[in-house]
Amino acid sequence: MTHTNPSEGPNQSPEKKRRYLTAEKKFQIYLEAQDGTKPVGELLRREGLYSTDLARIRQQVREGALQRLGAKPGRQQDQVNPDAYQAIKHELQEKERTQRQFTKDLGFRGIGQAGALPRLQLGCSLLGSGGRDAGRLMQRG
């Protein structure tokens, strides 16, 4: 079988790996594009970028500048590590899920439902005894 389209052949070119630019490089590209001494197209070709990449870099520079210029003077708040935040968020969700399952397994019902009524009545009767049995109620919790 012959292939008419070269891209269908067995010798396909390997996919290009994504290239990540450092913040310093992005800022250098931004400054060069803003300089205006050379055509932007020449800069894009040299760096292997598309116009959308340059638009994204310009937007990031704008957002960064607004964030820094809008900051109030004084001590800067500590930034939370995104990985640590995600780990804590996941741990909290897991604990909430476990707590829901635990309360479901115990058959707990909230106040205003039949399950809470006997405990509430017990508490009122103990408090009606002058409070001498209230300690036992707190221990039963």
Image (cartoon, rainbow, N blue to C red):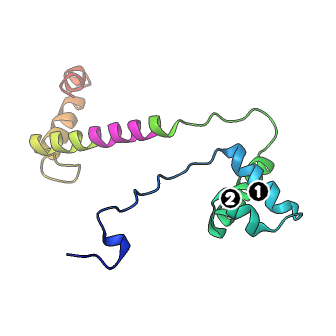
Please state the horizontal and vertical placement of residue 17, each as a whole percent of the image.
Answer: 47, 52
Q: Is residue 98 left or right of residue 33?
A: left
Please state the horizontal and vertical placement of residue 90, each as a whole percent of the image.
Answer: 34, 41
Mark positioned earlier in the residue sequence (2 or 1): 1
Pick out the residue farthest to the bottom: 4
**In-front residue for pair 27/1:** 1
Disc 1: which residue: 30
**In-front residue for pair 109/70:** 70
Label 2 crowd bin: few (<14), some (14–19), many (20+), radius 10 Å: some
Q: Residue at x 62, y 48 (%)?
A: 21
Q: Is residue 29 left or right of residue 128?
A: right
Quadrant for the C terminus, please: top left
Quadrant in the rendering for residue 96:
top left
Give the extent of the magenta segment: 85-95
Disc 2: which residue: 57
Q: Is residue 95 left or right of residue 14?
A: left
Magenta stretch, overall SS: helix
Please state the horizontal and vertical placement of residue 71, each as a whole percent of the image.
Answer: 77, 46
Find numbered disc 1 in the image and state the secondary structure of the residue it sits on: helix
Q: Residue at x 73, y 55 (%)?
A: 61
Find numbered disc 2 in the image and state the secondary structure of the residue it sits on: helix
**In-front residue for pair 104/23:** 23
Residue 136 in the image: above or below residue 46? above
Please state the horizontal and vertical placement of residue 129, each as a whole percent of the image.
Answer: 20, 27
Please report contact status of discs 2 and 1: CB closer than 8 Å, yes or no: yes
Residue 107 in the image: above or below residue 81? below
